[in-house]
Amino acid sequence: MRLLRLFLLILLLVCSAFAEDLVLVNGIILDGSGKSRFTGNVRIRDGKIADIGLFKPAAGETLLNVKSMIVAPGFVDLENLSVAALEKDVGATSSISQGITTAILGSDGTGPYLIEEFMQPFDEKPPGVNVAMLVGHSTVRRQIMGPDYKRSANEDEIRRMGELVENAMRQGAFGLASDLRSEPASFSTTDELSALAKAAARFGGSLFVHPRDVTIHEPLELARTAKVTLQLSLNKLTATVLADLDKARMQGIDVGSHIYSFTESGRELRSMLQNPSTAISFAQFLRDDKAVTLERVILKLTGLPAARIALRERGVLRKSVPADIVVFNPTLPSTGLKYVFVNGTLALKDGQPTNARSGQALR
């Protein structure tokens, strides 16, 4: 174990050597908090943001002039990459081209419960983007109940499923995900879901739920009784659902939602946070959502989704956090992004992927 930790430390040091040490100058900065934009510089050093704001670059520093361009946090995607695509680096390249620097895996409820076993290969061979994992309800249900899952779980089975969820949280999962429309999760009872949600909540985890039907009363009640942060994955937002969300928030329930739509090819899933649009890409979302300010749009794609799973150092631009950054022309975002940095390494340059693998397996 000591040798493995030494190897991983050396690997991280080597990866950081490829990170850019430079200053983005004269950019229009939206820091992901929803605050008003401001003009300033961003210093990237050793993979992190060393300074941000109105400061004078030091003599000899490498400068990248991004005058009149938006400088924002890398986008956080709650429902995107498949594990297979990530391992082949196909999905990561597509995501980087859209400005996604952090992807949450397992929101469909099929994530592993052996989190460390799953993540370790990405420590040794870094992914193209940062990845975080949700433990899957369907996975733990199959593990405990085997092929006999088309029924309600008994008390002992629920207890053992809860133990698997707790172990996954200890290993670095960010929460529990359940797709109640699909087997075997569709056979679960509210008592089962509540017990597993509480297991995740004990470690600060969130609960991601695809509801059984168009109503959201069951997951809202789960969030209330389990006192867990709830993130709903929906295929549309109706007036009734919006009213239920507003009522739940007034009652103190910590609930967020996102909707998803398929790309024109039908092969990849894209999440559009709290936006009833059927935009097919993050770049198009930037262009099409004119109902709110750009500050609010960037918040939806960065700080807001990161906060749903307590990713405190992603989705924001501030001193000392990893340099996950997107740079684009504010008048033509749908034509593509100019630059994307993942942990300080240039992953997209002049709109073209660099094939850098500078992502991290987050725990």
Image (spheres, grey):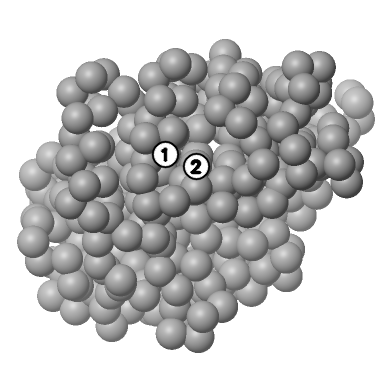
Secondary structure at badge 2 equals strand
Horizontal and vertical percent for residue 117?
83, 40
Residue shown at 27% from the left, 51% from the top: 274
Count of residue discs:
2
Q: CA distance from mark 1 to mark 2?
A: 6 Å
Q: Nearer the viewer, residue 200 or 214?
A: 214
Q: Residue 320's image quarter?
A: top left
- Relative to the observer, which residue lies in front, 256 or 88? 256
The residue pinned by badge 1 equals: 231
The disc label shown at residue 119, or none: none
Snapshot quadrant of residue 71: bottom left
Q: Nearer the viewer, mark 1 or mark 2?
A: 2
Q: Quadrant of residue 311?
A: top left
Label located before the other in sequence (1 or 2): 2
At 23% from the left edge and 19% from the top edge, which residue is drawn?
A: 251
Q: Is residue 352 visible?
A: yes
- Left or right: 293, with 25 as reference point: left
> Percent x, y for residue 352?
46, 80
Q: Is residue 214 above or below residue 146?
A: below
Q: Which residue is mark 2?
A: 209
User: Dots 1 and 2: beta carbons under 8 Å?
Assistant: yes
- Left or right: 133 with respect to 160? left
Q: Say what amino acid the circle numbered 2 marks.
A: Val
For the point 39% across and 60% down, which residue is it? 235
Q: Amino acid at mark 1?
A: Gln
- Would you call the spot at circle 1 few (<14 residues within 10 Å), some (14-19), or many (20 or more)? many
Graded by Cα atoms within 10 Å as few (under 14), some (14 to 19) or many (20 or more), the crowding at tag 2 reads: many
Residue in the foreground of this view, choosing between 307 and 349: 307
Residue positioned 67% across, 41% down in the render: 187
Say whether residue 30 is visible: no
Left or right of 39, for residue 107: right
Which quadrant of the figure contains the C terminus?
Answer: top right
